[in-house]
Amino acid sequence: MPAYTLELVVFGLGLAMLLVEAFVKLDDKRSLAWLGMLGLLIAFGLLFKVEPHGADDASVFWSFYSDDRTSLFYKGIALLTGIVVLLMAVDYRTIVNRFTAPGEKNASEEAGVGEFYILPVFACGSLMCMASANNLVSIFVSLEAVTITFYIMVAYLRRNVGSLEAGVKYLILGALSTGFLVYGFAWLYGVTGSMDLAEIGAALNSGEVNETAALFSFALILVALGFKVGAAPFQLWIPDVYQGAPTPITAFLSVASKAAGFVVLLRVSKLFLESTAGELSAHAAMAFAVIAGLTLLYGNLAAIPQTNFKRLLAYSSIAHAGFLLAAIAAAPSEEGSMSVFHVVGFYLGAYLLMTLLAFMVVGLVRVHRDSEEIDAYRGLAKNSPFLALVLLISMASLAGVPLTAGFFGKFFVFQLVVQQQMWLLLALVVIGAAAGFYYYLKVAAAMFWQEPKDASAAAIPVSGVSKVVMIALIVLIIAAGFAPGLILGLLR
């Protein structure tokens, strides 16, 4: 089965859900979410049936589309994230109803909910296209399809000021970053005469291109993709957007969107980092090292004083982008070293597990305690011990506690930085990792060592499906902490 069948299945699923929403009277639109989860689960199963195209297939299509193991891995991340996000959206339904309720008399309270379950499916398909993009045109088209979908989802709670503010900020800054991206691609095309990444790489290695113009195009592209992945100093939108967006959409932005952004960043930056002509490689590595250091410092230190949990996770997302950028800056130049694609892939796979686990708890607390402040988690271990345990494991993995997936993610980054002898960057990585222990585990301290704000607070109910998914994520986090090859094997 060719790889592009997966995108056809996902987009077909989205269209089918739109038709059901338009023409079938549904008193409870959660059935749309269950339909979406089933369809994405089928697409995930088909992922293991994909057969790469033959080396003798000279069709021009494959210059736009990649079906290597890396792209399939990131498609899996998009699909798994989409499934969990739809499950979170079901639990989040009461909040969506409250802030999207129509103004018409006698209108159903479910009137504004259907699209909340449909849009993530289209976003998932666009992210899958982005993971396979192998040409400047396909990169731009898929990236814009993702971004436009997120514009709508971030501002979905139209009667919530925070959501509208987040949507406006994301729209304005997203449009600005798109301008940088298009301008950077135009310069790169002008310098190399091609839009195909393989041909661009060959041109940059030839030594016949204008090095100054090539570096200028790299700088413009780095600004645009730095916005997408949340790298400093282009990260200012993240805390407000993450806090204002609906929690399931925040989880989607934090995991799948970041992963797709990094796979594009890796593919484009590889052209410059592996260039053998002039000083392109040295300048590109230096740029990544500086941005990684700034991102690590800003994300980790700004997270320390936060009192809103979603905002804390936003700064955490910036901090993790810093670790990933450090891995790219320290990309090995000699064969035999661990590939930066493997390190970044493992880190993002681990990040998927622990971040989705955290956001599942955040969404339930938001619904049942109507708060996203860390104070709302005080004494959670007393009235909801299962959720407290789930969040503890997630925080431990995000902090990099040994025997969790997060530990090996950071360990592999340390390994690359040490191998390249980038000692200043290593010091910043160490500072970032140490700061993470403080702000992640202060949430654990609130859950286990502090008294609840309301002594009569009831236990937070967890549906059977959500509980099964949480347990599965915990098992995978611990399993990858003992055997990182479980994730690395999917990349090789």
Image: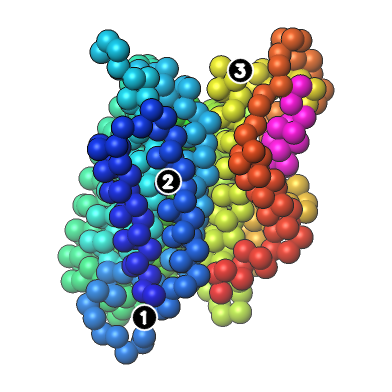
| Among numbered discs 2 and 3, the one appearing first in the sequence | 2
Residue type at the position of mark 3: Arg
Q: Is residue 385 magenta?
A: yes
Seen at 78% across and 54% down, the residue is 403
User: For the residues carrying marks 1 and 2, which lies nearer the camera in this image?
Assistant: 2
Q: Position of residue 286 (x, y in %)?
A: 47, 57
Which label number is shown at residue 369?
3
Is label 1 in contact with label 2 (beta carbons under 8 Å)? no
Seen at 35% across and 59% down, the residue is 9
Residue type at the position of mark 1: His
Q: Residues within 10 Å of mark 2 (few under 14, many from 20)?
A: some
Q: Is residue 218 left or right of residue 413?
A: left
Q: Position of residue 195 (x, y in %)?
A: 23, 68
Q: Residues within 10 Å of mark 3 (few under 14, many from 20)?
A: some
> Does the image show residue 223?
no
Quarter the N terminus occupies: bottom left
Chief SS of the magenta region? helix
| Among numbered discs 3 and 1, the one appearing first in the sequence | 1
Magenta extent: 383-398
**Position of 140 relative to 73 (above/below):** above
Residue type at the position of mark 2: Leu
Query: Which residue is tagged 2?
Result: 35
Which label number is shown at residue 53?
1
Q: Position of residue 190 (x, y in %)?
A: 17, 65
Q: Is residue 298 magenta?
A: no
User: For the residues carrying marks 2 and 3, which lies nearer the camera in this image?
Assistant: 2
| Among numbered discs 1 and 2, the one appearing first in the sequence | 2
Seen at 61% across and 49% down, the residue is 353
- Assign a secondary structure to mark 2: helix
The alpha-carbon separation of the residues under discs 1 and 2 comes to: 31 Å
Seen at 56% across and 80% down, the residue is 335
- Assign a secondary structure to mark 1: loop
